[in-house]
Amino acid sequence: MDSNQLIVGLVQALAWPIITFFIVLLLRKPFIELLKNVEKMKWQGVEFEFGQKLVNAEKGAKGLSLPSAEKVELPSFKQDMSLYEKMKSIAEISPAAAIADSWKAVEFATMQLADARGYDVSGKIAGYKIVDKLAADNILDIGTLSLYKELRSMRNSAAHHSDILITTSEAIRYVDLSLSLVNKLLVLAESKKTGKNKQQ
């Protein structure tokens, strides 16, 4: 093989990698912009989904005759102001934090109800499993179970997609639903405790 054939062979072997390199170089910026748009559409989709779930949860809650969210008292959440006012003030600063804290209150109330009903809550049992059991035992109605699951799903969206835009107004609406559910769970827990005391 002479030097000319060697050069031709090298050019043929390197032609596609070199062309590919220059194509990538030329299209790098448009490709990055395209990825940004896809990411933006994904976040907007999550934002839309959060808002839609909130609307659905509010519609479902109307038929449940939930107690007021404004008078919730939880021993683990003692504050200078009411829990409702505290959550609203957090929502003004960080909507996602208000959602997370409201959900903690729901989980706490769920455990209170489970404990009042004699369930073993000493171990690390997921709240959603306890709620399913409460529903299966006819302690919670289907509407309340559905609201719990909607709120949990929204909380997960807010927690796992921290870049999504949740407005203060949406966070306060979430707080309202969550603390209303907390009150319902606490009323159910208290009624069971009262029943036990009467029997004694």
Image (cartoon, grey):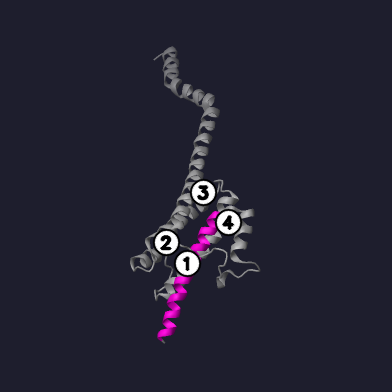
Q: Which of the 4 quarters of the picture holds residue 8?
A: top left
Q: Nearer the viewer, residue 1 or 153?
A: 153
The answer to whether one can see residue 122 in this image is no
The quarter in which the C terminus is drawn is bottom left
* Nearer to us: label 1 or label 3: 1
The reply to whether dot 1 and dot 2 touch (C-beta < 8 Å) is yes
Residue picked out by circle 2: 144
Q: Main secondary structure of the magenta part?
A: helix
- The Cα atoms of the two marked residues, 3 and 4, are separated by 13 Å
Of the residues under marks 2 and 3, which one precedes in the sequence?
A: 2
Dot 1 lies on which element?
helix
Q: Is residue 97 left or right of residue 1?
A: right
Would you place residue 3 above or below residue 179 in this image? above
Percent coordinates x, y for residue 93 in the rendering? 64, 54
Dot 4 lies on which element?
helix
The quarter in which the N terminus is drawn is top left
| Picture disc at residue 97 | 4
Of the residues under marks 1 and 2, which one precedes in the sequence?
A: 2
Residue picked out by circle 1: 184
Of the residues under marks 1 and 4, which one precedes in the sequence?
A: 4
- The Cα atoms of the two marked residues, 1 and 3, are separated by 29 Å
Residue picked out by circle 3: 161
| Picture disc at residue 52 | none
